[in-house]
Image: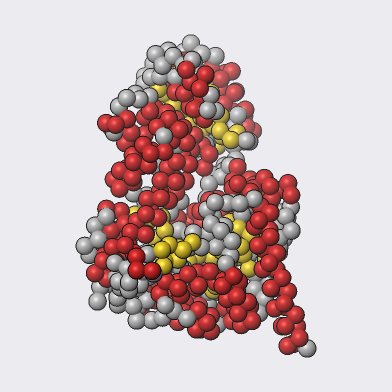
Amino acid sequence: MPTLREIQQAVGRSVIAGDDALAAGHVLADGLPPQARLGIYRNNFIGNATTALRLSYPAIHSLVGAEFFEGAASIFIAAEPPRRADLDAYGEGFPEFLAGFPPAGALPYLAGVARLEWAVNRALHAPDMEPLDLARLGAVAAADRDRIAFLLHPSVGLVEADHPLDAVWRAVLAQDDNAMAAIDLDAGPVRLLVERCATGVEVTRLEEPAWRFAAALYASRPLRRAIEAAPEVDAAALLAEHLAAGRFIGFELVDGPITSGLHS
Amino acid sequence: MGASTAPIGAERGPVPPEAGIGLRFLHHQAVLDERPPVAWLEVHTENYLGGGTPLAYLEAIRRDYPIALHCVGLSLGSAEGLDLGHLDRVRRTVERIAPALVSEHLSWSIAEGRYLADLLPLPMTEEALDIVCRHVDQTQTVLRRRILVENPSSYLRWRHSTIPEWEFLAAVARRTGCGILCDVNNIYVSACNHGWNPSIYLAALPPAAIGEIHLAGHSVRQLEGGRTLRIDDHGSRVIPEVWELYAEALARFGPVPTLIEWDTNLPALAVLVGEAARAAALLDCARQIADADAA
C-alpha cells in the first residue's frame, strides 16, 4: 500500500507536470478513466494559478490578450508552481519569465510593465505596519544623525525602467487608446516610486538625483551615505517628505563613525 | 494589533444559529453601504493575510456583523507537515479579526512544497487519519482555539481507502475535539459522484460537533455513456435536492449557523441575501421543532 507521502508526490507530478504514470494507478476508475479524474484537479490548478497571475498582472493581460496570457501563464506555472497557499504572493518570477519568453519579444517593454505590476501587487498586499514615530527620531543626538539607517515600510518600493512604463501601465488599465498611441517609448528611462495610499497604490516619477537618494535610504544605508550618493539634492526637504509620507517603520544607528568620502 | 487576548467571538459576538453569506471583494462596498439583512458573514482567510484595503474593509464590516474565517490553504492532510509560515500568517489574521468561527477542510493541497491550488481528497486510511489529527491539534494549539473541519467535495477515490469519509470525519472530531463544518452541498456532490447515500453520511456525524453548515450551487458535467460528474464550483443557486438534504440535516442537528457560498459568476448581493432568507426560513422551522421538543 502506498504511503500518503507517495500518493501526494505522485499527484503533485500529475497536477503540475501532467505525468499521470504513478498517480493513475492509485485512483479508482469507477466509470471514468483515472487520467480524466486527475485532469479535473490539473485544470483547477492551472485555472486558479492563472487567475492569481491575472489579478496581479492585469495590464499584461490587457496588453497581450487572454489567449496569449493563458498560454504564457501555463508554461510559467508548470516551471514555477506556487510555493505558498496565499496566491496573492504568487508570481514574483513572472516578469523574468516574460523577459526570456520568445513570443513576447515583439513587446520589449512587456517585462518592464510586469516588474511595475509586481511592485504594485507587493504594495497592495504588504502587511500593515505603524510608520516611524518621529519623536523617536527627534531624540537622536545630533552627532549620531549620520549613522541613522531607516527601515523601509514593506508597502513602498522603487522601479527603474528604460521605457516610460508608467504611461503604458496607466493607459492600458484606463483602456485609453489615445493615451497609449501618444506614448513615445523612446522617451528615455523612468524612475518610479510605488506606494500604498488610503485608496490603493500610487506610482510617482522621481527625478534621477531624488531617486538615487531614495534608493540609498530604502536600502537602509546610513543617512550620511545617502546624502553623499546624491549631493545635488535638498536632502533635508526630501527626507522630510519621506518621513511625512510614513515610508519608514523604524531606524537603527549603524555602528562606528561614518567617515566622509568612503562608499560602503 | 494587540488583539491576541481578544475573547473568542468578534465585537458582534459569536455566530448565531442563523443564515449568513460568504463575503467576496466585489461586495465589500455594497455590504458597508446597504447593511444587508443577514446574520453573519464569512470570508476566505487567505484573502486577508496582507494589510491595506481588504483588511481595512473587513475591520469596518466586523463592527456590524459576526465574522467567520474560512481557510483554504492550511493543507491539514499533507504528509510532509504543515507550512508553519502560512499557519503563522493565518494566526496573525485570526488574532487581528478575532472571528467567531475558524474553519478549514478535510483535504490536502501541498506536496513537495508546491501548492496545488485546490482541495484534494485524502486516501481514507489510518495513516491519513493520524496525520490529519496531528495537524488539527497543531493548528488548534497555534491558533489557541477550536476549529471546524469541513467535508470536501471530490471527483476521485483512492483504491486503498478503508474508512468511509463520514466515519473518518467523525473520528477527527472525536480525537481532536474540533468541530465539524457540514457542507451539505459537498455531501450531495460527492454522494452523486461516488454512489454514496447522503443520509448515511449525515447520520454518521455527531450532532454535538456540528458548528456550521455550508450551502452552495454546483454544476453538472455530462460524461460519455450518459454518466454525469458534479463539480462543486459555487457558481449558481442551491438546487432543490440540496435544500431537501439541508432540511434533513437540520432535523438531525437542530438549528446551526448556515452559510450561502458563492465564488464564481458572483451575482448581485441581493441574490445571496435571497438564498440566505431561504435558509433562514428552514432554520426557523427547525427552531420551532426544537422548542416544541424541549417543551
In the picture, residue A247 is in which quadrant?
top right
Q: Position of residue B156 (x, y in %)?
A: 36, 69
Give whichever of B177, B157 is nearer the camera.
Answer: B157
Considering every residue shown, the one lying at the far top of the view is A232
Looking at the rendered image, the quarter that the N terminus of chain A falls into is bottom left
Q: As drawn, is B280 to the left or to the right of A250?
A: right
Q: Residue at x 41, y 16 (%)?
A: A185
Considering every residue shown, the one lying at the far left of the view is A21
Give whichever of A234, B77 is nearer the camera.
Answer: B77
Q: Position of residue B115 (x, y in %)?
A: 37, 55
Looking at the rendered image, the quarter that the C terminus of chain A falls into is top left
Q: Residue at x 49, y 59 (%)?
A: B233
Q: Residue at x 41, y 66 (%)?
A: B229
In the picture, residue A132 is in which quadrant?
top right
- Residue B3 vertical placement versus B51 (above, below): below
Looking at the image, can residue A16 be seen? yes
